[in-house]
Image: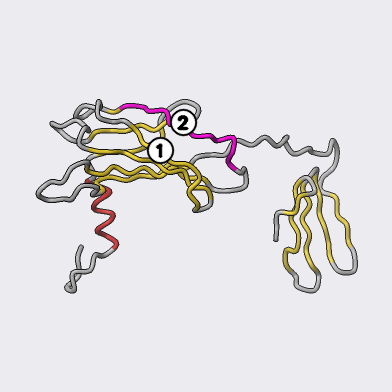
Amino acid sequence: SVSADRGPRPALVQVKYVYQPIGFEQGPGSGVVVRITNRQQWLDLSMYDVTWALESDGRKAQAGTIGVASIPAGAARDISIDVNTRSLAPYQEHWLTLSAVRRARTRWAPSGHEVAFGQIRIPAKTRRRPMSMPSVGGPQRNITDSSTSWSIGDLVVTIDHEVGGLSGFSVDSRELLT
């Protein structure tokens, strides 16, 4: 809705999302596959440009466009997007953001007006070997005057006695807590 001072409220974005003429969702199969659904009743998607951007921890990593003109009214297509997932860091969050904008100006919207958007989580491919587990027993404990550490396989967790909190977290001797 719009408030008395003509400022939009957050609910307006949710209404836009619910009524958008194009749907985006994760498609089947391996790789980055997006199912694009034309929710219109009579028109194909030739009036829209669809772009995608892959963001890693909030920073744009890759971007491109998708050809959707051939999707007729009421139909859906699975489209594979050429994303280099091997270059993605395994300890970061990755999201594919999709946006559909008007190609041409109309009476109700300028050229470039966004009519649909969506996000899909992209898992990173890890090249790291699986964590080794000890063949017998559980976690190993190491107590010093200043800290206590627990380890199991390649994972080590350290608690500082003075602070009483987590002071170290490492995998494969790589400290992840900074």
Above-or-below relation of 78 to 137:
above
Q: Are marks 2 and 1 in contact (CB under 8 Å)?
A: yes
Q: Does the magenta-highlighted stretch encompass residue 85?
A: yes
| Residue type highlighted by circle 2 | Asp
Q: Quadrant of residue 52?
A: top left
Residue located at (24% from left, 38% from top): 48
Q: Residue at x 62, y 43 (%)?
A: 90
Q: Quadrant of residue 119?
A: top left
Label 1 neighbourhood size at 10 Å, few (<14), some (14-19), many (20+)?
Answer: few
Q: Position of residue 91 (x, y in %)?
A: 62, 47
Q: How far separated are the C-alphas under marks 2 and 1?
A: 9 Å
Q: Which residue is mark 1?
A: 64
- Mark 2 element type: loop
Say which amino acid is labelled 1: Gly
> Looking at the image, which residue is at 17% across and 73% down?
4
Query: Pointer 2: what residue?
Result: 82
The boundaries of the magenta stretch are 77-88
**Residue 147 lies in quadrant:** bottom right
Left or right position of 54 against 21: right
